[in-house]
Image (tube, rainbow, N blue to C red):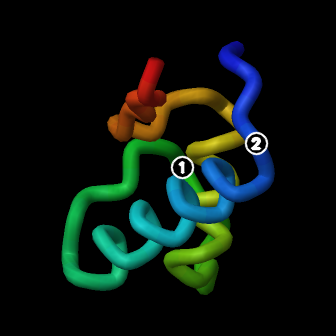
């Protein structure tokens, strides 16, 4: 998996959690009663968040 900085990781997880909170489908099976943040963290750890990072060169 690509290595992200802590700032990129926070931005990716936060953006995905917001998407989930606003009704986007969760791409993994999460335990009952999980928060959008927990679901986003699980997705990030499995490497399936549909968000890309473009770094300036």
Mark with earlier residue (2, 1): 2
Residue 20: image quadrant is bottom left
- Is residue 35 rendered to the left or right of residue 3? left
Residue 55 versus residue 53: which sits nearer the camera? 55
Q: Relative to residue 52, is residue 39 depicted above or below?
A: below
Whether residues under marks 2 and 1 lie with C-beta atoms below 8 angstroms apart, the answer is: no
Locate residue 56, reporting x and y percent. Answer: 43, 28
At a point 22% along the width and 64% down the height, the residue shown is 24
Residue located farthest toward the front when viewing the structure as drawn: 57
Label 1 belongs to which residue?
Answer: 29
Label 1: how many Cα within 10 Å (few below 14, some 14–19, many 20+): few
Residue 11: image quadrant is bottom right
Q: Nearer the viewer, mark 2 or mark 1?
A: 2
Residue 25 versus residue 17: which sits nearer the camera? 17
Label 2: how many Cα within 10 Å (few below 14, some 14–19, many 20+): few
Locate residue 1, reporting x and y percent. Answer: 70, 14
- Is residue 51 rendered to the left or right of residue 37? left
Label 2 belongs to which residue?
Answer: 5
At a point 51% along the width and 77% down the height, the residue shown is 36
| SS under mark 1 | loop
Locate residue 46, reporting x and y percent. Answer: 66, 31
Residue 28 versus residue 46: which sits nearer the camera? 46
- Marks 2 and 1, how far apart at CA: 26 Å
Residue 43: image quadrant is top right
| SS under mark 2 | loop
The image's mark for residue 21 is: none
At a point 37% along the width and 56% down the height, the residue shown is 26
- Is residue 30 rendered to the left or right of residue 4? left
Labels in figure, total: 2
Residue 53 versus residue 33: which sits nearer the camera? 53
Locate residue 38, reporting x and y percent. Answer: 66, 70
């Amino acid at each position: 998996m690509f290595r992200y900085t802590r700032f990129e990781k926070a931005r990716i997880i936060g953006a995905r959690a917001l998407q989930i909170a606003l009704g986007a489908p969760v791409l993994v099976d999460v335990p009952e009663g999980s928060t959008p943040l927990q679901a986003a963290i699980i997705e990030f750890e499995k490497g399936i968040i549909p968000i890309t990072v473009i770094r300036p060169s």
